[in-house]
Amino acid sequence: MISAMALTLRPNLLQKPVHRTRHEESRHATWLELFSDLAFVAAVGKIGHVLVSHYDAGGVLAFLSLFIPVWWAWVGQTMFLTRFDSDGLQQRLFHLGQIAAVVWLAASVPAAEKGDVLSFGLAYAALRLLLVAQYLWAGAHVPGAKPMTSRFASSYTFGLILFVLGAVLPDFRIILWPLALGVDMLGPIVFRRHAALFPPSREHTPERFGLFTIIVLGEVILAALAGAESDEFARTGWIIGLFGILLAFAVWWVYFDGVGGAEARLPSQQGYGSYFMWLYSHLPVHASIIIGGIGVKKAMQAGMGGAMPTAWLAVGACAVCMLFFHLIFRATYRAGRGRVFLKTEGPHWVVTALTFASVALAAAFPGGWVILMAAVLFGGHVLLVLRDTEPDLEPLRRGTPPIFRADQS
C-alpha cells in the first residue's frame, strides 16, 4: 500500500550546473527567466515613481541610487544564468528566493525614498547572497570553475557587506553604497581572465539585455498612460503623450535595428575592452530611458504651452541615451574612417551633438515642445538607420577573443 502510493520523482529533477556555453550551440531565455523578470518590472516601476514627485537633479540622484543596485542585481543574475543555468529543482528554488527578494526590494522603495533605506539594503543583500550561493554551488560541480566562482563570490560578498553597512549607517551611505557597487562592478573586470574560461553566451546575453530594454521602454508607455489619467492632465497633454510614444518607438528602433544591441553578435575581436563597453553602456541607456519617460508624464501635465523648468532633464536623457548607443555600436563594429565614417556614423554624431546642444535651449521652451524636439531628433536617427550603409560597415566577427572562447581548457 505504501509503495503503491510512493511519490516517484522524475529522473532529471536534481540537475547540477554545467557550463551552458560549452554544451549548447544555441541559448535563449527560459520561461523561468521571463517570469522572474516580472519582479524586476515591479521594482523598476516603483523606483521610477521616485522621479514623479522630484523631477529635478536631486530626484535623479535619488533615482540612480536605487536603480543602479536593481539593475546590477539583474545583470548579476543574468550573467550567472548565461553561464551555469540548469533546469533542476535547485535552480528553480534559487529563482524563487530571488523573486521574493526582488519583491521585498520593490516594497522597500517608498520607505527608501523617504530616507529609511534599511529594508532596501537588506533586500539587496539577500538578493546578492543568493547569487553568491549560486556561484559557490557552480564552483563545486562545474570542472575548473572554482577559481572563477570563488573570486566572484568573494567580491560580491564584500560588496554586499558594504551595502548593508551603508543601510545600517545612513550617514555614511553616500560613501559606502558607491564603494559597494564599485567593488561589485569591478569584479568581472579584475577577474576577467578567470571569467574568460567560462564565457557568456553570445546569443543569450544580448537577448536578455534586449528584454530589459523592452522593460524600461514599457515604463515610458506607462508614464504616458499615467500622465493621461492624472487629475493634472492638461487639455493638450494628449499631443505630448503621442510624441512620447513616438519617442519610445524611435528609441526601440535605433537600439534594435540601428546599433543592433540585442543581436547575437557580442564584441568578437577587440576583446575585453569592447565587451565591457557593450555591457556597462546599457546602464546609462536604461536609466536615461526611464528619466525621459517620466519627463513625458511631467510635460503632459504641463501641456503644450505650460512651463516645465526641468524639461532639460528629458532632452538631456535623450542625449545621454544617444551617446551610449554610439558606444554599444562601436563595441561591435570596426571604427570607420574617412568617407566610410562620414557616410555611416558621422550623421548620427551630428544628431547627437544637436541633442546635447538642445539641452541648453530647453529652459526657453514649454515642456511639451521640448518633448516634441526630442522626438524629432530621435526620429532623425531612425531616418539615418533606414539608409543602406551595411556594405560600408565591417562587423567585428572574425576571430574570437578569450572572453568568448567556449573551448578553452
Image (spheres, rainbow, N blue to C red):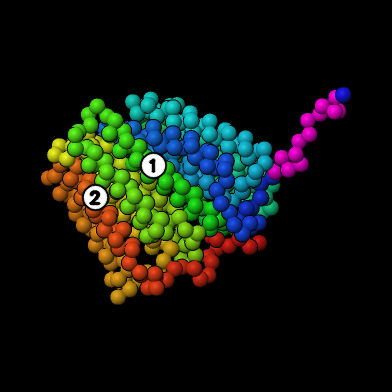
**Residue 313 visible in the snapshot:** no
Residue lying at the far left in this picture: please name it.
364
Name the residue carrying label 1.
218
The amino acid on which the numbered mark 2 sits, given as a three-letter code, is: Ala
Q: Secondary structure at mark 2?
A: helix
Q: Which residues are magenta?
A: 2-15
Name the residue carrying label 2.
374
193 lies left or right of 296 = right
- On screen, residue 335 above or below 406: below
Check residue 4 for magenta coloring: yes
Name the dominant secondary structure of the magenta segment.
Answer: loop
Quote the CA–CA distance across marks 2 and 1: 18 Å
Name the image quarter holding residue 245: top left
Query: Of residues 158 and 374, which is closer to you in this image?
Result: 374
- On screen, residue 349 above or below 144: below
How far across and how far down the image is residue 85, in percent? 61, 46
User: Quarter of the image containing the C terminus?
Assistant: bottom right
Name the image quarter holding residue 118: top left
The amino acid on which the numbered mark 1 sits, given as a three-letter code, is: Gly
Q: Residue at x 85, y 28 (%)?
A: 4
Q: Residue at x 18, y 45 (%)?
A: 369
Q: Secondary structure at mark 1?
A: helix
